Image (cartoon, rainbow, N blue to C red):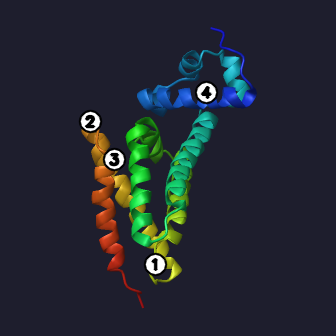
Amino acid sequence: MSAPRLSADARREQILDVAIDVFGRAGYYGASMNDIAEAAGVTKPVLYQHFDSKSDLYRALLDEVGARMLTAITKATADTSDGREQTEAGFKAYFCWVAQRHDEFMLLFGGSARHDGEFSNQIRRITDDAAAAIAPLIAVDIDPDHRRTLAHALVGLAEGASRQLVGLGREFDPDEVATMVSGLAWAGLRATQRVN
């Protein structure tokens, strides 16, 4: 069961990538550190050199997956110039992430661990970070609190559509879905007015 020699950082990344698959198949409670070590081709002591416990590994995984999702959206919207273009690019990047990284989506938004007190605050923070990244992109003259509320609504819109698509258990065209959802979001944003 010896794996090729990797640097500590490369080994940690490899373990995280393997853990996504293991947790994606078995869920947090169904997966064991033995399962993850075996899938990664390392011994349990090597696994414990990188992560103190299964919950430590899972927390690191949630942070990594949340960062990957936010990076995809941020990169896609970085070079856009107007609100509609940003809305379309952001939703396209998000739905491509869901389509290509189904297990990562399930890890953040589909598993029972999401409702577990140990992880729910962390997932809420990741959702808050997504809304915080989206809020400045909302090109509507409204106060900051209203803007944050709309940003959370957009996150919920994307998550809800993704849950339905993933729940169908078949492939979907992320560009087509992004066009529909961003059209809905853009129409709503254009109709938004300052709340007194």
Q: Secondary structure at mark 1?
A: helix
Q: Residue 152 location, x and y as percent?
A: 44, 65
Q: Which residue is mark 2?
A: 170
Give the residue at the far top of this rendering. Answer: 1
Determine the CA span between mark 3 and mark 4: 28 Å
Q: Is residue 48 left or right of residue 25?
A: right
Mark whose residue sits in front, 3 or 1:
3
Q: Which residue is mark 4?
A: 15
Can see residue 195? yes
Of the two numbered discs 3 and 1 on the same chain, state the one appearing first in sequence.
1
Determine the CA span between mark 3 and mark 1: 29 Å
Q: Residue at x 43, y 51 (%)?
A: 94
* Callout 1 amino acid: His
Q: Residue at x 60, y 41 (%)?
A: 59
Q: Residue 134 location, x and y as percent?
A: 49, 65
Asked if the residue under mark 2 is in contact with the one under mark 3, i.e. CB atoms within 8 Å, the reply is: no
Of the two numbered discs 2 and 1 on the same chain, state the one appearing first in sequence.
1
Q: Is residue 20 left or right of residue 191?
A: right
Q: Is residue 31 left or right of residue 33?
A: left
The C terminus, quarter of image: bottom left
Determine the CA span between mark 3 and mark 2: 12 Å
Asked if the residue under mark 4 is in contact with the one under mark 1, i.e. CB atoms within 8 Å, the reply is: no
Q: Secondary structure at mark 2?
A: loop
* Callout 2 amino acid: Arg
Q: Residue 193 location, x and y as percent?
A: 37, 85
* Callout 3 amino acid: Pro
Q: Nearer the viewer, residue 50 or 2?
A: 2
Q: Which residue is mark 1?
A: 146
